[in-house]
Amino acid sequence: MTADQERVFESYCRVQGWMVINPQFVTNNPSLGTQLETLNGIVNRMSDHAAAQEVHYAQTLLVSTDEIEKREEVLSYHMVPIAKVARALRGTVPGIGVLTAPKGNVKPQELITAATAMAEKAVIYKDVLVESGLPADFIEQLTAATAALKASINGRGLARAARVAATEGVGNEEALGRRTVQIIDALVTRQLRNDPSKLAEWKQLKRVTVKGVAVRAPLGVVDTGAKPAETSSTATVAASGASVQAA
């Protein structure tokens, strides 16, 4: 939740608490109880959405870190060794020069495409590459590492999408909560019309607090062009200056 949404959420919770310690108002108006149930549901769902926001955000960070490791695994520990052996065999094995590794700054999706293509091309040269020292299952290892990288990228996308959905959910519930509190306010205010102190209490707790304190300018119009009032000391200095000039 944003800071503003948190303050709105806190106001909803205060309304809940006030209604719990003042059940007589619900007793006097069953419709108020219905609106309170609606508000309770809104508060619960906002809490769930907010928790989901945090969870999915944490997941995007974890997946991002995991993605870096898996990217390194695919490029440095699988593709580069294959490319180095293939480069050493150029001139002796026709066409093996097609097995090349991309540069280190390649984008993740482009890396997946390149790794998939390398695995497919390497099938033709598998025997000679294995004879030159690569593991017998080097293609399977490359394919598995590429799949793990792809899963990591997809996981990050899913976590981001889920977080966006949770954020949207918070916003929708906040809007519904504002309308619900407006209705509750109308019903409660009507019952408190003859109880000024209780009404003041209600109005205070249901309000959404504002961030910071606004500093208001003093009332009245200030003439910024006006000269400061002359004091006795300034008049004396002025008089002394005039005497010097006259002399």
Image: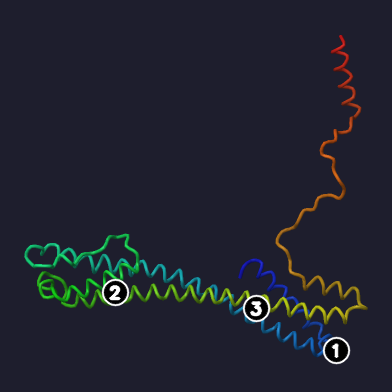
The residue singled out by tag 2 in the image is 145
Q: Quadrant of the C terminus?
A: top right
Which residue: 24% across, 72% down? 117
The residue singled out by tag 1 in the image is 28
Q: In this picture, is 32 found above or below 73?
A: below
Mark 1 falls on what kind of element? helix
Q: Amino acid at mark 1?
A: Asn
Residue 146, position as x, y percentages in the image: 29, 74
> Which of the two labelled residues, at mark 1 and mark 3, occupies the earlier sequence position?
1
Which residue: 74% across, 69% down? 208
Q: Quadrant of the N terminus?
A: bottom right
What is the quadrant of residue 27 in the picture?
Answer: bottom right
Which residue: 75% across, 78% down? 181
Which residue: 84% across, 73% down? 201
> Which dot marks residue 173?
3
Question: Tag count in the figure?
Answer: 3
